[in-house]
Image (cartoon, helix red, strand yellow):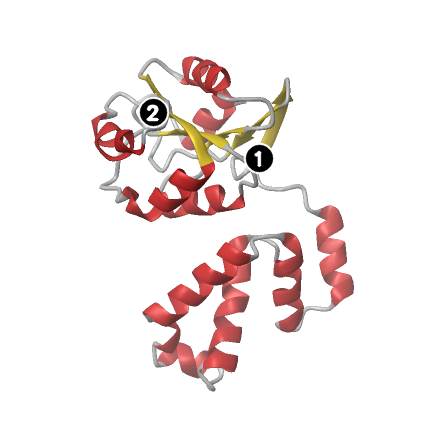
Amino acid sequence: FLHRNATAHCLDGLFAHRFCHLGPDKARRNCVCRDATRSKFLRYAFGKANDARFRCRVINLAGIAKENIRKALSDFRGVEHRLEKVARVRGIDFINDSKATNVNSCWYALQSMTGKTVLILGGKDKGNDYTEIEDLVREKCSALVYLGLHNEKLHDFFDRFGLPVADVQTGMKDAVEAAYKLAKKGETVLLSPCCASFDLFNSYEDRGDQFK
């Protein structure tokens, strides 16, 4: 229940019940929860309180007993390649979010960052619109590492931000080394690529494993 998709499902029902004055099933049938208002509500909810306490509160409101939530928290070990904490090297944290193969997933990753971040992104572009993460990159990122065989689109969009940039077309080892050189003590190196992995890697799992 602590995964964001499950939380979104709970929020879906709560939104329908509390804000649309309909039961979740009826609201869903009438597409009430598919409009822009619901989308804005979910984005606001995660943007303002994207943490376990908030999620637990939402799940509790949805009818899950607190003792069951506590048990789930105590057993929860995270999901590999999804905001996976890998290491801390000389005060720099490394987080593997290789499963973020689209811009929306990277949005959630950046939103969860509490300090300045060196973002590694790039790969097989799927027609991405990077405007979704523009504000977060400006706010959260201290540098960018483009990792892919064709990084022209990344240059076209992000270079105007004025952040330090490294262009890596050779593989993960060089990308991690470049990110480490750009990061300062207390910052985070985040692999959250926004793209598919198939230009340099066999899969997002392979990409994440090489990052680790």
Q: Quadrant of the N terminus?
A: bottom right
Q: Residue furthest bottom?
A: 21
Residue 172 lies, in percent from the top left, at 42, 18
* Three-letter code for the amino acid on which mark 1 is drawn: Glu
Kindly check if marks 2 and 1 are in contact, taking CB atoms under 8 A apart as contact: no
Identify which residue, 125 or 167, lies in the foreground: 167
Q: Quadrant of residue 57?
A: bottom right
Q: Quadrant of the C terminus?
A: top right
Image point 45% across, 25% down: which residue? 206
Residue 24 lies left or right of residue 170; in this view the side is right
Q: Quadrant of residue 58?
A: bottom right
How crowded pointer 2 is (Cα within 10 Å; few <14, some 14-19, many 20+) is rated as: many
Position of 85 relative to 185 (above/below) = below
Image point 60% across, 32% down: which residue? 85
Residue 149 lies left or right of residue 32; in this view the side is left
Residue 146, label in figure = 2
Q: Which residue is mark 1?
A: 84
